[in-house]
Amino acid sequence: MKLRTELLLINVASTLIIVAAVVYSYIQMLLNLKQAGLLTIIAVVAGVLSTLAYWLMTKPIINSVNRLIEFADEEGADMSQGGTPNDAPAKGPVEVRQLTRSVHEMKERMHENVLQLEALERTRRHLVANVSHDLRTPIASIQAFVEALEDGVIDDHETSTRYLNTIHREARRLSLLIDDLFELSKVEAGQQAYDPETGYVDEILVGLLESSSVKLQEKQIRVLVSVEDEVPPLQMMPAKISRVIHNLLDNAIQYAPRQSEIEVTAIFLDETREVEVRIRDEGPGIQSSETEQIFERFYRVDKSRSRNSGGAGLGLAVAKSLVELHGGRIGVRPRNNGSSGSEFWFTLPVSGL
């Protein structure tokens, strides 16, 4: 039974109770016939008037609620098919208009949640596609070279050494990909604690150049390192900053042409009390329209080239997350001397967080 009908029956029942009380009073001779008749007429007229007033007052409320219900049903069906939210009808008493606004706000939040879920689903599919490719490629290479070594088809020592170096390189590539995924998931889940200690940028650079020497030698790339004397020790997580510089340097090596130069510079910015690390390469450069997107997960400036070189599109996203964890900034810009290539940079506050 609808609420309006229930309230109407309660009003009629109240009127009947009053009439019954008048009749009982007359029977008990508490009222004479004239008094009982007058009170009965008054009770009946009051009941009719209250019923009419109730009917007229509740009609717009009921109509407004019904419109709101119809609107919610239509919007629910439309949003389930990917439609955008529409404005709810704002008619009726103040309370109904407030309810309408609340429903509209709730609908907006639901729409935003749906869009977020759709974005997460797209990211999940993108993740599976990219990671599957980037895991399959080195695994296939490792498997092929191991089978060749096991079958004994390789006789000379030089070829065996080259195969073993390739296996080592592909295994390291797998390890770096897994590390990037793990690092990014921890930062985005808020599980990466900030536990700084005193660190030195020059020491980090020396260690990274040693670990990247094989890649640099393969492409005959020369690295020029310059650290200003004014660069102070920093409160940071050295392993994480090493990861940032490694990813930026690896990106520079990946896109730098053979027999080119990469410049790594660390300077102290006195105005902002920051240390800025710059990594310049002589690669093809980056379009200005892509300078923000390049730090997104799985974004590739040149998808076919990234596929061939094995980039998963995670390194720069990891670098951005770790720099921001330290309270710093990161970006990319064209080389300031007019040469081809890009200059990736990031800053770290001297005082720490």
Image (cartoon, grey):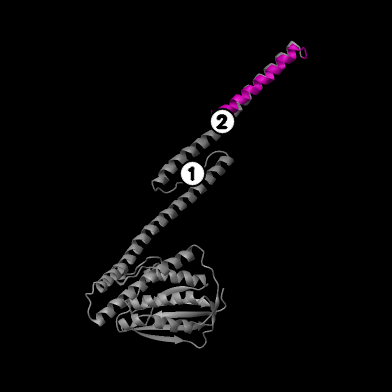
Please identify the residue farthest to the right as the structure is shown: 30
At numbered mark 2, what does the secondary structure look like: helix, strand or loop? helix
Asked if the stretch drawn in magenta spans residue 112, the answer is no
> Residue 206, how many percent across, how many down?
44, 84
| Viewer-side residue, 320 vs 239 | 239
> Residue 198, how many percent across, how many down?
55, 80
Magenta highlight: main SS: helix
Residue drawn at (55%, 35%), measured in percent from left and top?
A: 61
Name the amino acid, label 1.
Ala
Name the amino acid, label 2.
Leu
Query: Residue tagged by mark 2?
Result: 3
> Residue 92, how many percent across, how many down?
55, 38
Q: Is residue 292 visible?
A: no
**Residue 174 image-quadrant placement:** bottom left
Residue drawn at (41%, 44%), measured in percent from left and top?
A: 78
Query: Residue tagged by mark 1?
Result: 88
Residue drawn at (54%, 33%), measured in percent from left and top?
A: 62
**Label 2 or label 1, whichever comes before in sequence order:** 2
Instruction: Specify few, some or many for label 1: CA neighbours under 10 Å numbering under 14, 14-19, or 20 or more.
Output: some
Q: Which residues are magenta?
A: 1-30
Residue drawn at (58%, 41%), measured in percent from left and top?
A: 95
| Viewer-side residue, 239 vs 317 | 239
